[in-house]
Image (cartoon, rainbow, N blue to C red):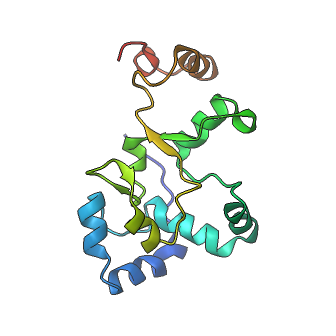
Amino acid sequence: MNAIVWQDVRTAGAVAAIERAGGGPTVREKTGLPPATYFSATKIQWVIQNVDAAREAVAAGRACCGTIDSWLVWNLTGGPKGGRHITDVTNASRTMLMDLRTLSWDDELLAMFAVPAEPSPRSARLLGPSVTSASKARVRAALPWLPSWATSTRP
């Protein structure tokens, strides 16, 4: 199986800066990931630093940052009309911002990448018992090709 990913070389300088400042071992220890342009932390950092509208939205508390799963869940649960801004821990763990030991956004990593915690999604186990049957039905209706096991009502 192949995947299309977004490895943004505009963030290479940020990755090099983390390594030069001695942050590489901390990133590896907490996340299990090497500092790299492949993961979300430096991309979010770059957008906040280089896109005026994004920086203003973050400052005003109107921004949401996340991965594709958080965007899908937000839209499938109402979007701007009360959508849930959450992510699965399996995706959150690939951002370089989550401590694998606590399964929480890590303050030290957030500070290292200059990413505020507020726009980050709440992490959860999305397809487990915490998701309501109504949400699962909405997902099945929006994505009829999704295998039934992905929205099973069993824990």
> Between 132 and 13, which is closer to the camera in this rendering?
132
- Residue sitting at x 58%, y 71%: 46
Q: Picture quarter containing residue 23?
A: bottom left
Residue 139, image x, y percentages: 57, 22
Left or right of 84, for residue 27: left
| Position of residue 16 in the picture relative to residue 70 (left or right) | left
Residue 110 lies, with reference to residue 103, above or below; the image says below
User: Image quadrant of residue 65?
Assistant: bottom right
Res 82 seen here: yes
Q: Position of residue 82 (x, y in %)?
A: 70, 34
Tell me which residue sits at (67%, 55%) in the image. 63
- Look at the picture and state if 104 lies above or below 20: above
**Residue visible at 54% across and 50% down?**
66
- Classify 103 as above or below 19: above
Which residue occupies the foreground of this view, 142 or 52? 52
- Asked where in the image residue 39 lies, by quadrant, the reply is bottom left
Residue 130 x %, y %: 44, 25
Position of 62 with respect to 152 (left or right) is right
Locate the C terminus and report the quarter of the image it occupies.
top left
Furthest toward the bottom, the residue is 20
Which residue: 34% across, 86% down? 20
- Is residue 2 visible from the viewing direction of this image? no
Q: Which residue occupies the foreground of this view, 24 or 150?
A: 24
